[in-house]
Amino acid sequence: MDILPITPHLGAEVIGVDLSQPLSNEDFSAVHQAFLDWSVLVFRDQQLDKDQHKNFARKFGKLHVHPMYKQRTEHPEVLIVKTTADSAYTAGDGWHTDVTCDEFPPMGSMLYVTETPECGGGDTLFADMYLAYDLLSDEMKRMLEGLTAVHDGAIPYVGSYKSVPPEGGYPRNEHPVVVTHPETQRKVLYVNSGFTSHIKGLKPNESRAILEMLYRHISATPRLVARVQWQPNTLTFWDNRCTQHHAVWDYYPHSRYGERVSIIADTRPAA
Ligand code: SIN
């Protein structure tokens, strides 16, 4: 197995693994270590059906069912990520971390793209939230460390995607603004413009100002970012505990199709 970094700190292509086959313990350990080292792993030329995709994901934990999922199908854990000329939006078209409104948000997500736009484009940007935290001043780190933020599923799912909430509403949960990655023990900036509604205990204008400053820090710091260019049959596996991502919808009216499987974290995000 070869690991080819995409940037010096975030993202790597993994060469020489066939994800349709069960991984040996040795290969699993190497993929797991690469996941911790690079946070975003790209596997090209994979031929996977839904069961093989889920089997690979299950190596990392229990599978997640998306809160917007409604139909009864054979594969409720497979989220279809499809954009066509008729789409009103493309999923994930803004900086976010997947489903942080959940009490136990997904630790990772695996998107398997089988159709890329004819005109090119449709890349996904990833941002390194370890580095986003590290680049803050010591004073700002100290201030953020005691704070807790509210993450609300209604923001994207109702506000952006106009879906009808399930009975009882979409999940809404609190997580620390700075969390510790449970495996690497490194600190991570853990607020995102997709889901975070406000910081608890602050006045609305204070919360808004701090969140806007942090979101600007993410969007205005190119060195945080790795860009994944998809080819048909690419699977990308990202660590939601230390990254954000942004789908780029630059290919209208062309189409793109992928299937995403996410893995539930077995611990809540914690400081
Ligand atoms: C997502 O947010 O999971 C979608 C990412 C993408 O389609 O590139």
Image: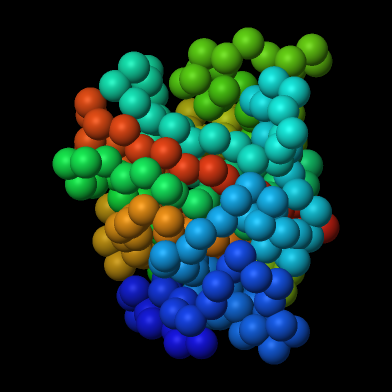
Q: Residue at x 37, y 44 (%)?
A: 115
Residue 207 locus on image (x, y percent): 53, 36
Q: Is residue 265 above or below residue 213?
A: below
- Residue 101 location, quadrant: top right
Q: Residue at x 69, y 51 (%)?
A: 51
Let me know if residue 40 appears in the view: yes
- Residue 84 location, quadrant: top left
Residue 92 locus on image (x, y percent): 45, 37
Residue 18 locus on image (x, y percent): 55, 73
**Which of 229 and 244 lies nearest the eye of the viewer?**
229
Is 139 placed left or right of 31 in the picture? left
Is 57 placed left or right of 118 in the picture? right
What is the number of callouts on the image?
Answer: 0
Q: Residue at x 48, y 81 (%)?
A: 16
Residue 12 locus on image (x, y percent): 42, 75
- Residue 151 location, quadrant: top right
Colour scheme employed for the rendering of this structure: rainbow
Looking at the image, the residue that sits furthest to the left is 119
Split into 4 quadrants, where in the image is the C terminus? bottom right
Q: Residue at x 37, y 20 (%)?
A: 87
